[in-house]
Image (cartoon, coloured by chain):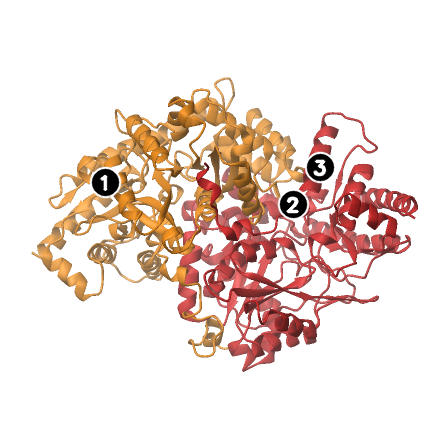
């Protein structure tokens, strides 16, 4: 009898990804193609993940040059790299113990880098103060979100801790919550016609009402810009959410990792922290907030480096001490990731030797994405049974599928959600990997697919070609 | 927004307070980076600002951070990693061919050929294969399945994940986890966090900190009264004690774990750090398989390794892995689910691990330099281990077991009763008081034995043997002088 027949029910009860089968099949197909098996396509277009490097977007030269020089300081003495790269690397290495990125750092991160993060935040937020001692760098934003949840969630409490999360929502967030023994309390985002998704406060009230009997709601998780929804909250909406959190005594978790992914022409990201500060007392002095950011998204796209941070606001000093111990026990975040975070917040400035190239690369990335969104929306909206709402930010599009009854029936017959069925066929027949809306939660009877739009232009065009041809055929076959 | 406001006004009115925060977290302690270290950092700051102290620098001998103490990185590793970071350098003749070959292979296995892409949650497949091959070579050909390898953010991440999986039950049925006293406080801290029951078994200080199965049995039987013991954690080579388990001892432990139906967690991050003559690292897996199918086909086990220690010392990369043995497929499924919450381990750390398990071969251009550097680091550590033991044993009131392996010494200090009383007055545990005084007077930061656990009435400190030999000699001298002064003061 296995020792492990008894394992933590919190772990056992977490819902596995709906997409395990889809992903496994994708790996199989990729392997077959590598081995030379013939299929209708030569390569799988993988736009499942919010991973721009994976789709072919190039890393920023300045960032990689500095990182390379930090890893192998001999480069600083060579003539291989621009002067400002070498200077930056030198200055960063001075901030690492004995000039090595292999040394540990303080638990919260290299103090000088943490300090510069607080300066970045202040600048971003129009001067609202940010204090280094409230900032922790971690291996990715999900890691620090998990740590904050650990503090909030008492897995033995009865009733159990509840955390409000949006529908649709990135599944790892919900997985983290249930793995800790807390309860997910869903609030529905509203998909307005032609207006994109929005967070409406009455849905928050509704969610809270529904949770009354089942758990003790303690925290409210928002993600802005949204994933997968791509919406950006206006100031007024953020204020309403803050007021709601204050009134209902909820700890605010603001996931802002997509703050650098803005493609709407007139869109502007404003942080929860900034709005909170501008609301003044009593809110600014009392609402407890954790804001998260990361190097994984935006023009950096450095998911594999695993680096993000959390900034804590208005948290009880006694509780902060324990948060500090929790981060200490984890060991420090990877140093190269910490450096990447610093470079993200302190890019080359006009006049620096690396600036022209940096400017060109980042402009190219941004304009490609704006163009991607426009073009993909246009094409999808021209197809039958397919509708793409305008989005303003984030790394994804979430178009809605209006599937013919025959397709829905067929899906039921094979035991799949209809949008999963669509995705499986899209992968097999067209070699395109996207994720189904059922992965994120959705209103019953609605179906979506989600895919990454932070791709190079040629990948986008190939994607559209295959998607269009597949979709038209699919709709015909099931009409 | 005032500083006070941003930092948090006291409890009244707060959503998250000491009363309603996760009660388990309040029990976590982690002395390695505790108050003493914070004081050390503050003193450093003061020194930088020109404040006069009886010493010119703070020597942080508290944390097993080799590079911070002057150990040099391995050239080959850093070359390959630089190439992975900025592949344009592949065209440059500054780098040897074997480094370029490794870099190209790693990049090919990365999404979009970038080290910045997510990898699979379990880690890049070809790297897991390389790790499996390394384990096979290390263990004399005993097969290792890449599917059983999980790359992680340092070994700590994998250790915590395994414990999360294992801890369950309520009340008297709550999972009990056996850990050594003394132990690396990641274990005690994680058990506190998970609300698991800590079952302490004492290592035998009189016998070089050896592990005695009789003591394991004693601890287990006592624990059965109030919990459900399911896990046995071993650190070999040991931290903080540095003992290297004999093969016989490992066999005995395996036999015990099987009899008592325990899951074995073998923390082997110091496997290359073995110095004492007559001592050899035996992996738990190897011994398990050599004990025959009765054991090797049934024992459930996880072994852990890392890129932070040994001759690499690359703590900042957070590279590591665990190998699981004989896990039920259903349980593996749950483990895979848990691991996906972390998304993936840092890819540079995965790349570094690949190099550690796949170092330059004799026929390759970088081999000579690599072997020279590796040998030099390990030889220096061996010499420092010997020097430390020798020096401490000349000090009346300090007894030091041989540092057989790992990176630390854990000597026992005799404290005069008056010192113990004084500590009590100050509200300190006696060895913490000793370490605070040492820090303030000599600028040397250690970790008190109370941070690792010790027999009641005994006191210790943990010091790393990492400073360069000349500096280490100075540190040993200063501790010696301090100890004599301290003893004198409280006589």
Residue A167 location, quadrant: bottom right
The colour of chain A is: red
Q: Helix or strand or loop: what does disc 2 sit on?
A: helix
Chain letter for mark 3, please.
A
For the colour orange, the matching chain is B
- In the rendered structure, the answer to whether residue B146 lies left or right of residue B37 reads right
Q: Which of the two discs, 1 and 3, sits closer to the camera?
A: 3
Q: Does the CB distance between marks 3 and 2 fall below 8 Å?
A: no
Residue tagged by mark 3?
A25
Say yes or no: labels 1 and 3 on the same chain.
no
- Residue B473, labelled with which disc? 1
Q: Quadrant of the N terminus of chain A?
A: top left
- Please indicate, yes or no, whether residue A399 appears anywhere in the rendered image: yes
- In the rendered structure, the answer to whether residue A301 lies left or right of residue B24 reads right
- Residue A61, labelled with which disc? 2
- In the rendered structure, the answer to whether residue B456 lies left or right of residue A464 reads left
Up the image or down, A448 lies above or below A38; here it is below
x and y percent of residue A310 in the render?
Answer: 53, 61
Up the image or down, A135 lies above or below B226; here it is below
- Please indicate, yes or no, whether residue B211 appears anywhere in the rendered image: no
- Neighbours of disc 1 within 10 Å: few (<14), some (14-19), many (20+): some
- Neighbours of disc 2 within 10 Å: few (<14), some (14-19), many (20+): some
* Closer to the camera in the image, A342 or A212: A212
CA separation in Å, label 1 and label 2: 45 Å
């Amino acid at each position: 009898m296995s020792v492990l027949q008894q394992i933590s029910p919190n772990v056992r009860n977490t819902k596995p990804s709906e997409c395990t089968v889809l992903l496994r099949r994708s790996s199989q197909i990729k392997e077959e193609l590598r081995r030379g098996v013939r299929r209708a396509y030569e390569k799988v277009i993988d736009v499942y993940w919010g991973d721009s490097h994976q789709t072919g977007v190039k890393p920023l030269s300045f960032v990689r040059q500095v990182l390379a020089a930090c890893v192998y300081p001999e480069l600083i003495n060579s003539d291989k790299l621009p002067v400002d790269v070498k200077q930056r690397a030198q200055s960063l290495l001075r901030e690492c113990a004995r000039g090595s990125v292999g040394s540990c750092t303080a638990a919260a991160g290299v103090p000088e880098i943490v300090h510069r993060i607080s300066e970045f935040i202040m600048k971003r937020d129009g001067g609202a103060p940010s204090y280094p001692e409230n900032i922790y760098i971690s291996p990715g934003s999900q890691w620090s979100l998990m740590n904050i949840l650990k503090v909030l969630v008492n897995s033995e409490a009865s009733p159990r801790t509840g955390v409000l999360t949006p529908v649709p929502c990135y599944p790892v967030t919900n997985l983290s919550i249930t793995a800790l023994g807390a309860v997910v309390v869903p609030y529905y985002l509203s998909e307005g016609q032609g207006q994109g998704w929005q967070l409406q406060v009455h849905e928050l009230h509704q969610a809270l009402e529904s949770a009354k009997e089942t758990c003790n709601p303690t925290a409210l998780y928002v993600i802005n810009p949204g994933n997968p929804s791509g919406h950006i909250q206006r100031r007024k909406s953020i204020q309403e959410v803050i007021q709601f959190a204050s009134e209902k005594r909820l700890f605010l978790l603001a996931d802002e990792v997509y703050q650098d992914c803005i493609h709407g022409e007139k869109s502007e990201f404003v942080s929860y922290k900034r709005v909170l500060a501008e609301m003044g007392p009593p809110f600014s002095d009392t609402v407890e907030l954790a804001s998260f950011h990361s190097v994984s998204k935006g023009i950096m796209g450095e998911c594999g480096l695993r680096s993000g941070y959390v900034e804590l606001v208005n948290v009880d000093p006694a509780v902060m001490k324990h948060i500090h111990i929790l981060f200490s026990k984890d060991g420090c975040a990877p140093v190269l990731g910490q450096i990447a975070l610093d470079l993200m917040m302190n890019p080359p400035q006009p006049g620096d030797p690396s600036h022209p190239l940096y400017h060109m690369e980042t402009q190219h990335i941004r304009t490609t994405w704006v163009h991607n969104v426009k073009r993909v929306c246009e094409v999808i909206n021209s197809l039958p049974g397919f509708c793409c709402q305008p989005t303003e930010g984030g790394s994804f599009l979430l178009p809605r599928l209006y599937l013919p009854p025959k397709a829905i029936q067929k899906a039921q017959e094979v035991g799949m959600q209809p949008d999963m069925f669509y995705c499986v066929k899209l992968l097999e027949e067209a070699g395109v990997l996207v994720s189904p809306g059922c992965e994120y939660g959705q209103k019953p009877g609605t179906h979506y697919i989600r895919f990454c739009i932070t791709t190079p232009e040629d990948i986008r065009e190939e994607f559209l070609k295959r998607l269009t041809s597949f979709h038209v055929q699919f709709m015909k076959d099931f009409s | 927004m005032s500083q006070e406001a941003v930092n948090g006004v006291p409890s009244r009115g707060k959503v998250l307070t000491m009363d309603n925060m996760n009660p388990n977290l309040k029990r976590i302690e982690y002395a390695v980076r505790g108050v003493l270290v914070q004081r050390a950092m503050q003193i450093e700051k003061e020194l930088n600002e020109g404040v006069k102290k009886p010493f010119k620098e703070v020597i942080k001998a508290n944390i097993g951070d080799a590079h911070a103490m002057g150990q040099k990185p391995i050239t080959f590793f850093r070359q390959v990693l630089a190439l992975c970071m900025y592949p344009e350098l592949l065209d440059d003749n500054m780098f040897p061919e074997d480094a370029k070959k490794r870099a190209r292979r790693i990049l090919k296995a990365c999404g979009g050929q970038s080290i910045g892409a997510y990898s699979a949650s379990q880690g890049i497949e070809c790297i897991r294969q390389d790790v499996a091959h390394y384990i096979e070579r290390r263990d004399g050909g005993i097969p290792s399945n890449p599917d059983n390898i999980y790359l992680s953010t340092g070994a700590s991440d994998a250790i915590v994940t395994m414990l999360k999986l294992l801890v369950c039950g309520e009340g008297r049925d709550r999972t009990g986890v056996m850990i050594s006293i003394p132990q690396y406080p990641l274990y005690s801290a994680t058990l506190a966090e998970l609300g698991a029951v800590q079952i302490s078994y004492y290592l035998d200080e009189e016998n070089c900190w050896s592990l005695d199965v009789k003591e394991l049995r004693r601890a287990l039987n006592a624990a059965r009264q109030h919990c459900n013991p399911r896990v046995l954690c071993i650190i070999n080579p040991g931290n903080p004690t540095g003992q290297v388990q004999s093969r016989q001892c490992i066999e005995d432990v395996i036999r015990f774990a099987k009899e008592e139906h325990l899951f074995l967690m073998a923390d082997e991050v110091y496997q290359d750090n073995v110095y004492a003559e007559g001592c050899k690292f035996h992996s738990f897996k190897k011994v398990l398989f050599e004990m025959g199918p009765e054991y090797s086909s049934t024992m459930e086990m996880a072994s852990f390794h890392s890129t932070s220690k040994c001759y690499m010392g690359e703590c900042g990369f957070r590279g590591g892995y665990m190998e699981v043995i004989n896990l039920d497929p259903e349980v593996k499924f749950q483990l895979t689910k848990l691991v996906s919450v972390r998304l993936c381990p840092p890819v540079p750390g995965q790349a570094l691990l690949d190099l550690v398990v796949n170092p330059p071969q004799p026929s390759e251009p970088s081999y000579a330099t690599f072997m020279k550097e590796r040998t030099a680091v390990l030889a220096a550590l061996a010499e420092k281990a010997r020097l430390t033991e020798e020096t401490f044993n000349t000090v009346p009131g300090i007894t030091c077991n041989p540092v057989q392996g790992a990176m630390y010494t854990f000597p026992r200090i005799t404290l005069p009763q008056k010192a113990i009383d004084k500590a009590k007055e100050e509200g300190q545990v006696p060895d913490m008081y000793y370490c605070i005084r040492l820090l303030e007077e000599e600028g040397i930061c250690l970790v008190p034995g109370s941070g690792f656990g010790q027999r009641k009435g005994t006191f210790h400190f943990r010091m790393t043997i990492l400073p360069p030999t000349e500096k280490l000699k100075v540190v040993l001298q200063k501790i010696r002088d301090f100890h004599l002064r301290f003893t004198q003061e409280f006589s």
